[in-house]
Image: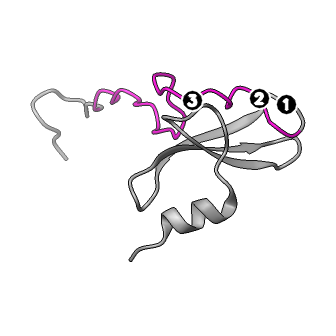
Amino acid sequence: MAQGSGGRRGRRAAEPVLPLGSLARQDQHHPVGTAACAACGSDRLTRLRLTLADGTEVTFVSCHACEHRAWIPLDGDGTALTRDQVVERSSRR
């Protein structure tokens, strides 16, 4: 069986490996009060920037060490919202 004009089957050039997406972005601004856990002081935190239903921009912080969670407004002084405030601001009307 005859092969193509090159005599050998060519391999495709390897496609460049693209980095996977990430929830963590180094260029995101996180507010005061999100560098360490408010409950235990650990710096092993997951930080997610979110916008609540009423438009309030917050950073959700979850501690890997003690599982404490907080929602801290981006435009605030580092004081976390209460769970009731988060629920109220997250409900669709």
| Residue type at numbered disc 3 | Pro
Distance Cα–Cα, label 2 vs label 3 = 11 Å
Q: Please give the residue where the numbered disc 2 appears in the rendered image.
A: 36
Residue 49 screen position, x and y as percent = 51, 42
Q: Secondary structure at mark 2?
A: loop
Identity of the residue drawn at 52% across and 44% down? 58
Distance Cα–Cα, label 1 vs label 2 = 5 Å
The quarter of the displayed image where residue 31 is located: top right
Q: Secondary structure at mark 3?
A: loop
Q: Is residue 23 above or below residue 14?
A: below
Q: Please give the residue where the numbered disc 1 appears in the rendered image.
A: 42
Q: Which secondary structure is most common in the magenta stretch?
A: loop
Q: Residues within 10 Å of mark 1 (few under 14, many from 20)?
A: some
**What residue range appears in magenta?**
12-39
- State yes or no: residue 27 in magenta: yes
The quarter of the displayed image where residue 72 is located: top right
Q: Is residue 78 above or below residue 86?
A: above
Identity of the residue drawn at 52% across and 40% down? 23
Residue closer to the observer: 88 or 52: 88
Q: Please give the residue where the numbered disc 3 appears in the rendered image.
A: 31
Q: Is residue 79 above or below residue 32?
A: below
Q: Which of the two labelled residues, at mark 1 and mark 3, occupies the earlier sequence position?
A: 3
Identity of the residue drawn at 35% across and 26% down? 16
